[in-house]
Each structure stands twice: as structure tokens, then as C-alpha cells.
Image (cartoon, helix red, strand yellow):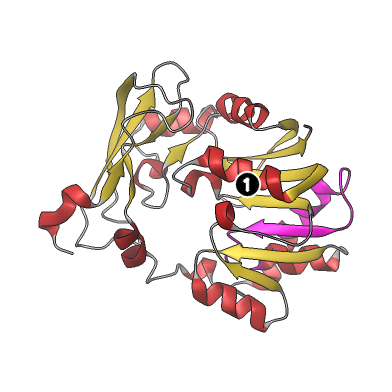
Amino acid sequence: MSRETAMNERIFYGKCPLCDSVALEDAYTASCATHPLYRQELSPIMRWKRCIPCRHVFTEGYFTEEVCRLIFTATNENQQVGFELEQQRHVSARIVEKILPYASSGHWLDVGFGNGSLLFTVQEYGFVPVGIDLRRENAQRMADLGVRSYWEDIARLSLDFECSVISMADVLEHMPFPRAGLQAAYRLLKQGGILFLSMPNTESAIWQALNENQANPYWGEIEHYHNFSRSRLFQLLRECGFDPLRYGISERYRFCMEVVAKKVR
């Protein structure tokens, strides 16, 4: 792929991926040239749109399969199975403990499991760990370690059991169509099952402060297609059949939120 083909890097949305409105405005323009997954064959410019009716913020388009293959030829060290397992175990344990008031057993599906810490930790707490990841080597490595895992998109995933818990820790913002991801989670969860989400929160004070100082790193996050606010995420969850139960602050990444929700219909 050459720089001359940059116009074909993304499939343009043309409308809001959450509410389908075509009433859009420019929100932000940033460079992703310093991102570790950036490749010189790609345009360094990221353009963000805002939906005027629902206020959701998203990139002008999502990458083609060709570009995704190019980007995912490399894996960040912190996304490799086993990375800093001892340190990450404590962070993962605190996630599990936030779920325990609502679910304490059954299959726990971790979407985009990365270094695998959460899967290993839920197993310690008595859950049956199941993983899905878009990085083939991660899925194979996890399977080699005895954890049921899939190299698949959750929208196409089929299981012969219902899940008690599904976690999407810093995943939904990576999906071209988040509603489809939540609908898949709804389909795979048992009635009353629990969904765990984490992602940056555009309504947080620190997000606003970094914007004012033009120092917000998430505008140049090459793997992200969406920047969610707490209020828009809660609305989307309710539209997809979930009741938000708990809001918290994430320890995984900067100024991120954590949300626990329940399948209710």
C-alpha cells in the first residue's frame, strides 16, 4: 500500500454509527504519526466527527481489512499473552471483585483479552474463562495454555453455552459499529447476565482539561473509532437491552471509566 492510496484507507461512515443521523459536524483533527502501530504507508491525519442530534464523537471512517492486516502485523508488548502477569493480576482482581455482587460463577467471556490477565484471574475466582481476540497468535497462545479461546469477531461468535459475564475492557471504542458489539454480547449472555465495559470518558474533567491544552492523546489513538461520553454510553446500553448498575474509575488506562450493566430484556 502506498501513500497515494490513502483515500482508500477508511470506509467512510457518512452518518452516525449509533443513531444513523446524517447531521454531522467536524469535532477534531489530530496526528497519529507517533503512535507505535502507525505505518508510513498510511495517512498520519485522524479526522473526528460529532453527531449533532446524539452528540457522539467518532472518526470519519473505519479502516479497511487491508489496513487492519497491516496494523495488526505488530502487537503492543502490553497486549501479548503473559505480559506483566503478576502486576496485572491485581488490577484484574479488582475488576472481578466489582462483578462478584452480581455474578459469582459460570462462563466469563473476555472480548479482546490481550495479555490474558483477566482470564487467568477470573479462573482463580471460580469462573470458567473463555477468550476472544482479533490477534491470531494471542488466541493460539491462550489455547496452548488450556483456556478456551477464539480468533474471531464477537458479532460472528457462536457458543454452545450462555455466559454469566462478558467483559469488554477498552474494546468497544475499537469496534467500527459498537451497537453490533453490544447486540452480540446481549445474544451471548444468559438472562440477567453481566456486562463489564471500560473506555475513555469524554465528560470527565481531565478530558476537558487536556483538550484545552491540546494534550489529549486519545485524538491520535490509531486503533480507536469512537470517543464515548458516560451519558451517551448509558443511553446506548439501554437501547441494547442493558441496565447500567455501576459506574467507576478505571485503573487500566488514563481517565477511563468502568461500567457494569445487566441484561434485562
What residue is shown at x 36% (from left), y 39% (from top)? 215
Residue 96 is covered by the magenta coloring: yes
Left or right relative to 208: residue 132: right
**Residue hosting label 1:** 184
Q: Residue furthest top?
A: 53
Report the magenta residues as a range.
91-116
Left or right relative to 85: residue 133: left
Q: Nearer the viewer, residue 72 or 36?
A: 72
Q: Judge whether residue 150 can be spotted in this image.
A: yes
Q: Judge whether residue 198 can be spotted in this image.
A: no
What residue is shown at x 35% (from left), y 66% (from top)? 69
What residue is shown at x 65% (from left), y 83% (from top)? 144
Please tell me in which quadrant of the rendered image residue 42 appears: bottom left
What percent of the width, then of the height, locates residue 8? 20, 50
What residue is shown at x 58% (from left), y 78% (from top)? 140
Q: Nearer the viewer, residue 138 or 84?
A: 138
10 Å crowding of disc 1: few (<14), some (14-19), many (20+):
some
Q: Amino acid at mark 1?
A: Ala
What percent of the width, then of the height, locates residue 67? 30, 60
